[in-house]
């Protein structure tokens, strides 16, 4: 596990998108995707759910965010997002 991988994970979850995170961090989208996948492999857990509407944290990601330094300053990336209402 590398600090950069955690930074990429945090950016992807905060922005809700690997593409937006890559733009924000000024790196390529495949780099973020690959590094988050490597982090998941290293930890042996799935950290994000990937879908057409972007990425969302799994329960494991929420736990890791709380365990890491993010614990001392709560971040919206790890907070459960409300489900869209069916209006």
Image (tube, rainbow, N blue to C red):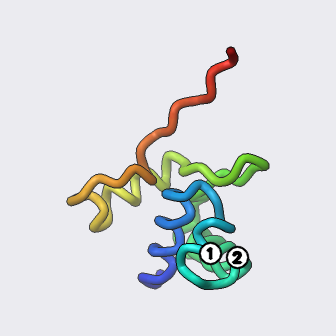
Q: Residues within 10 Å of mark 1 (few under 14, many from 20)?
A: many
Residue 69's place in the image compared with 28, above or below, is above
- Judge left or right: residue 59 versus residue 71: right
Which residue corresponds to mark 1? 22
Label 1 sits on a secondary structure element that is helix
Which residue is farthest right? 52
Residue 72's place in the image compared with 21, above or below, is above
Q: Image point 21% across, 59% down: which residue? A: 72
> Which of 58 and 11 lies nearest the eye of the viewer?
11
Q: Image point 47% across, 81% down: which residue? A: 1
Tell me residue 78's x, y (percent).
43, 51
Q: Mark 1–mark 2 contact, CB under 8 Å?
A: yes
Q: Image point 70% across, 76% down: which residue? A: 29
> Which of 70 and 84 lies nearest the eye of the viewer?
84
Q: Residues within 10 Å of mark 2 (few under 14, many from 20)?
A: some
Q: In the rendered picture of this protein, how many numbered marks are placed on residues? A: 2
User: What is the distance, in whole Å, between disc 1 and disc 2 at their CAs?
Assistant: 5 Å
Which residue corresponds to mark 2? 29
Residue 8's place in the image compared with 45, above or below, is below
- Judge left or right: residue 70 versus residue 39: left
Tell me residue 20's x, y (percent).
62, 66
Q: Image point 62% across, 75% down: which residue? A: 22
- Judge left or right: residue 51 versus residue 44: right
* Corner quadrant of residue 87: top right
């Amino acid at each position: 596990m590398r600090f950069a991988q955690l930074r990429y994970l945090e950016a992807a979850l905060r922005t809700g998108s690997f593409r937006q995170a890559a733009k924000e961090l000024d790196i390529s989208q495949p780099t973020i995707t690959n590094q988050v996948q490597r982090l998941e492999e290293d930890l042996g857990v799935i950290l994000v759910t990937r879908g057409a509407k972007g990425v969302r944290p799994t329960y494991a990601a929420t736990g890791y965010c709380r365990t890491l330094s993010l614990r001392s300053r709560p971040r919206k990336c790890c907070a459960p997002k409300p489900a869209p209402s069916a209006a």
